[in-house]
Image (tube, rainbow, N blue to C red):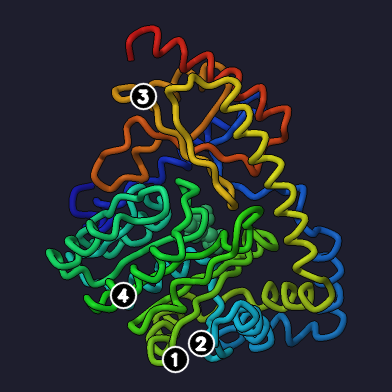
Amino acid sequence: MDGLFATRMHNTQKSFIREILKVTLNPDVISFAGGLPNPRFFPVREINEAANKVLAESGENSLQYSTTEGYLPLREFIARRYQKRGLQVDADEIMITNGSQQGLDLAGKVFLNKHDPMVLERPGYLGAIQAFSMFEPQFHSVPLLEDGPDLAYLETELKKTSAKLMYIVPNFQNPSGITHSLAIRKELAVITDRYNTVVVEDDPYGELRFMGQELPPIKRFRKGVHILLGSFSKIVAPGMRLGWICTSSDIMEKLIIAKQAADLHSNFFSQRVVHQYLCDNEIDDYIAKIRAGYRNQRDCMVAMIEKYLPEEITSTKPEGGMFIWATLPPGMSSLELFDQAAAQNVAFVPGTPFYIDGGGSSTLRLNYSNSDEEKIEEGMKRLGSCARKLMAHGN
Ligand code: PMP
């Protein structure tokens, strides 16, 4: 098979998470591994009604080809929502994509040549590492501290590498649950402007804040090239595969060309149905329900971590989103803990795949949005006992 595949495929690992998800297909497994929203909150009846209405009122049109930018009324809806949050954005500055994941691919296509240096957070979102790997950049990572990236480190890295692009998830990051503070957001904008870095701000979780104060997108503080990604996956349903890119019209021109080449446009029927759903339902009421549900699940997991895990294991306490990040005592391997836990029918994601430099061997990601409180308690009880056994054996 040597020489059959393009070189870019050599550097792109099969997602480790997909491999782990295979373990979790067993219905007896309590899984904190996936990153799935809670399906209990999917608006099945409302989407059914919206789909019927779209078909009845504009059937032929909704099944036709459409524009690359996406359905204008849906883009206007997104722009208005940003305006309410203090971002002056016009519908021309929004393009609909197949989830925010496609935004990552298109940003890579438009900005990255092979070997271009780029920066991301350490740990970083695995799907972004995968998407950007396709363009064979030179990855550099900046450690995440409690309230965002280490900015002194970032500045040194930008000075040293002249990185062209920086990728960040400022709200309830996947995998760590960490949020960039207001001060970090402002300073990060200044630093990236100073070095003319293109910033890709990925924000699929921003609306899932269940405690603390809402913070403005970093876009608000930037002067340079900025790509803000959003998604309906966590606030409506991921199966609709709809997200968006928000950027200035000069940059949008290039992204439209890349999108056209990739797929002409995103599923138009899906866009029409989600738009109809948004017209007929109060999305904020729906988001409030998701937030309340995730808050309960998060509170339960935090309490069960305190009750069952050895105190040497530290963890984040996110104010929103879907993930908690845990750190084992030095020298203890989360891969070994994974093997022990899998034997007890409990799964999580060991931290190493989130590090582009092979670090993170004693870290792990726990998802709480897709398990009920009973499962969270039972899972943490089993995980605690596996961790104690490993610690007793000197790992
Ligand atoms: N970015 C981040 C940080 C994510 O966690 C996810 C979903 N796991 C995505 C992008 C992709 O989401 P989607 O394509 O469904 O919008």
Towards the viewer: 361 or 237 = 361
Q: Residue at x 52, y 54 (%)?
A: 172
Above or below residue 312? Residue 80 is below
Contact (CB < 8 A) between labels 1 and 2?
yes
Residue type at mark 3 is Pro
Residue type at mark 4 is Val
Q: Looking at the image, is mark 4 or mark 3 nearer the viewer?
A: 4
- The dot on residue 249 is 1
Q: Looking at the image, is mark 3 or mark 2 nearer the viewer?
A: 3
Report, in whole angstroms, how far the alpha carbon at label 3 lies from the one at label 2.
46 Å
Pointer 4 residue: 190
Towards the viewer: 38 or 325 = 325
Tell me if residue 271 can be seen.
yes
Q: Looking at the image, is mark 1 or mark 3 nearer the viewer?
A: 3
SS for callout 3: loop
Question: Quarter of the image holding residue 8?
Answer: bottom left
Towards the viewer: 105 or 119 = 119
Contact (CB < 8 A) between labels 4 and 2?
no
SS for callout 1: helix
Report, in whole angstroms, how far the alpha carbon at label 4 lies from the one at label 2.
22 Å
The single residue placed furthest to the front in the displayed view is 183
Q: Earlier in the sequence, mark 4 or mark 2?
A: 2
Pointer 2 residue: 93
Report, in whole angstroms, how far the alpha carbon at label 1 lies from the one at label 2.
6 Å
Q: Looking at the image, is mark 4 or mark 2 nearer the viewer?
A: 4
Residue 347, image x and y in percent?
Answer: 53, 29
Pointer 3 residue: 329
Q: Residue at x 62, y 63 (%)?
A: 207
Q: Residue at x 60, y 69 (%)?
A: 242
> Does 386 sit left or right of 158 as displayed?
right
